Image (cartoon, rainbow, N blue to C red):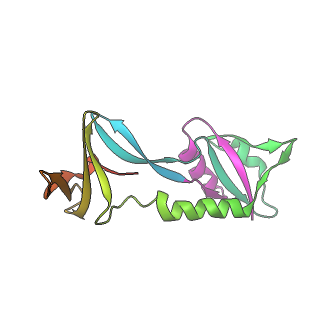
Amino acid sequence: MNWIVVQTKCNCENKANVNLVRQGFECFLPKILKVVRKSGGFKRIKKPLFPGYIFVNLRKKQNWLKINYTFGVNKILKFNENLCFLPNKLLLEIKKKCDLSYYSDSLIMGDEIKIVKSFSFILNAIFDEYIDSKRSYVLIDFLKRKMKTRVNNNHLILKV
C-alpha cells in the first residue's frame, strides 16, 4: 500500500474525504474525542487528529493528479517534486490506536469521570450505568458516602 499525505483547505477534512472516496480513492481521516465548550455546557465531539491533513492510499496505475483538483483539497504534500509515501507500519499504528481508544466514547461501570456544568462547578464521580441516551447514573462522594444520582450525559467527561 502506498499512502500519501494530502493537505486540505481549512476545516474541509470531511469534504475532501467524501469527495476523494467518490472518485475511488481509499482515504483515512483519523479523529479523536475532544471536549469543547458550547452554549454554556461542555460537549464531546470527534475532531481530526491531524487538522488540515488526510491520508490517501494510491493503488498501482491510479491517476493521482486529480487529487489536487478535488473539492476541499489544497495540495498533495511532496518533497522535491516527488510524492512522499508514509511507512505502512506508521499508518497501521495510527489506525490501531484510533480503533482502540479514540473512537470509543462509551463509558463503562467504574470509570472515573468528572461532572462539569461550568468552569466553577466540577465534581469527581464514578460512572455506574446508562439510563438512556441522555442520562446516566453516577456515584458521588457526599459526606464520606457514595450517593447514586442521575446526570445528563453531556456533563460527563472521562477523567484523564
Task: Give the extent of the magenta segment.
Answer: 1-30
Measured as percent of width and height from the top left, residue 22 is found at: 61, 56
Of all residues shown, which one is farthest toward the front? 144
Q: Is residue 132 above or below residue 55?
A: below
Taking 83 as reference, is 28 left or right? left
Q: Is residue 140 left or right of residue 105?
A: left
Instruction: Locate the N terminus and report the quarter of the image it occupies.
Output: bottom right
Q: Which residue is painted at 69% across and 59% down in the image? A: 90
Q: Is residue 99 left or right of residue 26?
A: left
21 is within the stretch colored magenta: yes
Label tally: 0
Measured as percent of width and height from the top left, residue 45 is found at 40, 47
Residue closer to the observer: 20 or 9: 9
Residue found 38% across the figure and 39% down from its top: 36
Query: Magenta stretch: residue 78 in it?
Result: no
Query: Residue sitting at 78 percent across and 48 percent down?
Result: 65
- Residue 107, quarter of the rendered image: bottom left
- Residue 114 in percent (x, y) is at 29, 48
Residue 11 placement (x, y as % from top left): 54, 38
Between 60 and 40, the one lying in front of the other is 40
The residue at the point 37 percent across, 47 percent down is: 44
Q: Is residue 53 left or right of residue 107?
A: right
